[in-house]
Structures are given as C-alpha cells and as structure tokens.
Image (spheres, rainbow, N blue to C red):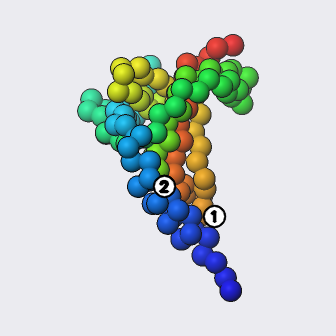
Amino acid sequence: MAFDIDALITRGIAVAKQKVATVMVPVDHYMVIDRDQSGPILAEEPVIRDAIVEDESIEVIENDGTSSMTSSKLTFLEPVPVDDGDQFVLPDGRSGQVAKRGGLMRADGTRFYSEVWLGKRNVR
C-alpha cells in the first residue's frame, strides 16, 4: 500500500487551517515589484494575508557573515511567494524586513506552507 505523502500533508494543513482560524490575523505584505540602485521598490498597496504571528527572537547568520535578530515569526498555512526585500506590517503596527524564510517543502521544491521571520539586517 503506497501513501501519497503530498496529498496527506495537504489535507493535514487544510485541517490545521480550520482549527487555528481564530488565532490567525491579517498582515499587510508589501511585495517587491522592482529594484534599482538604492534597493527594492515595493508595491504601494499591500496584499492582505492571514498568518499566525508569534514573537520570536532568534539570530540568523547569512552566508556573508552578517546577522539579523528576528522579532516575529509569521506562519502562512499556504505557500506564499516571499522576496528578501518584502516588508510586512503586523496588526499592531510593527513592521519588519524578511530575515529568514522557511516552510515544509514538496519533492518538486514548492512549499506546502510558508514561514517568515521578521527582523533587522546587518547586526554585525
């Protein structure tokens, strides 16, 4: 008997999404639409996404040795395209840059769901 792991995980995430709907909050996601010499250019209007928001402070060390301290972790129970230059604004007005991205991956490299840690870049 073979299991379709992707289908099983997808169903599990759908059940989880229903169970935690009351703790999910809307966050504003300002996506990168272009870049110029000064950095990312963000969309003027955000995409509103429901997320589980947790206060979480971890240090993220980049490949170049710079580090970031995170302040919040956002969990989207769906795959969300996130660029390192994107900005998120939480319901309480706090905002942050993307310090780290994650989420459970399928064999084809796409995500079942997305996690985003917000923080400040270049601590070191």
Answer yes or no: is residue 43 visible: yes
Determine the secondary structure under disc 1. loop
Marks 1 and 2, how far apart at CA: 21 Å
86 is higher (above) or lower (below) than 4: above
* Mark linked to residue 21: none
Q: Earlier in the sequence, mark 1 or mark 2?
A: 2
Q: Position of residue 25 (x, y in %)?
A: 37, 37
- Residue at mark 2: 16
Pick the front one: 47 or 33: 47
Q: Position of residue 87 (x, y in %)?
A: 42, 28
Name the residue rendered at 42%, 40% in the picture.
23
Q: Position of residue 31 (x, y in %)?
A: 38, 36
Q: Quadrant of the C terminus?
A: top right
* Mark linked to residue 107: 1
Pick the front one: 51 or 88: 51
Name the residue rendered at 56%, 64% in the picture.
9
Pick the front one: 58 or 66: 58
Q: Amino acid at mark 2?
A: Ala
Q: Amino acid at mark 1?
A: Ala
Q: Quadrant of the N terminus?
A: bottom right
Name the residue rendered at 72%, 30% in the picture.
63
**Residue 51 is drawn in which quadrant?**
top left
Outermost residue to the bottom: 1
27 is higher (above) or lower (below) than 22: above
